[in-house]
Image (cartoon, rainbow, N blue to C red):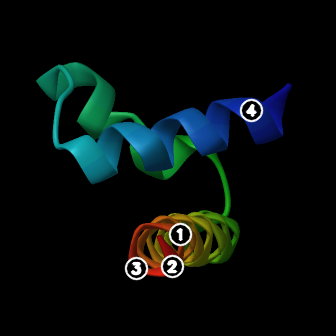
Amino acid sequence: MNLLRQIKTVLWSFVGLGRRQDMADIPGRGNPLVLIFIAFVLVLAFLGTLALIARSVAAG
């Protein structure tokens, strides 16, 4: 459950939405290295999805 909360934290930070109180609680939600790792994995997944869409559009 903690992992899901950290993923949710990273996704909200990507969008830039959230309450000020939620942003103040981020340091207490977990290890910053885990949050950085989750962010890195999600960015790679996003870029991979964009590359897949671009490849399928260019192919035909």
Rendered location of residue 33, percent (x, y): 64, 77
Identify which amino acid the numbered label 3 is placed on: Ala
Q: Are marks 2 and 1 in contact (CB under 8 Å)?
A: yes
State the count of labels: 4
| SS under mark 3 | helix
Identify which amino acid the numbered label 1 is placed on: Ser
* Residue identifier under label 4: 4
Rendered location of residue 58, percent (x, y): 40, 79
Q: Reply above or below: 51 against 30.
A: below
Task: Give the distance between the C-alpha atoms of the residues marked 1 and 4, in whole angstroms.
Answer: 31 Å
Nearer mark to the viewer, of 1 and 4: 1
Task: Give the distance between the C-alpha atoms of the residues marked 3 and 2, in whole angstroms.
Answer: 4 Å
Q: Are marks 3 and 4 in contact (CB under 8 Å)?
A: no
* Residue identifier under label 1: 56
Q: Residue at x 65, y 65 (%)?
A: 38
Task: Give the distance between the C-alpha atoms of the residues marked 3 and 4, in whole angstroms.
Answer: 35 Å
* Residue identifier under label 3: 58
Q: Are marks 3 and 1 in contact (CB under 8 Å)?
A: yes
Q: Residue at x 80, y 41 (%)?
A: 3
| SS under mark 4 | helix
| SS under mark 1 | helix
Q: Are marks 3 and 2 in contact (CB under 8 Å)?
A: yes
Identify which amino acid the numbered label 2 is placed on: Ala
Identify which amino acid the numbered label 4 is placed on: Leu
Task: Give the distance between the C-alpha atoms of the residues marked 2 and 1, in whole angstroms.
Answer: 5 Å
* Residue identifier under label 2: 59
Q: Residue at x 55, y 33 (%)?
A: 8
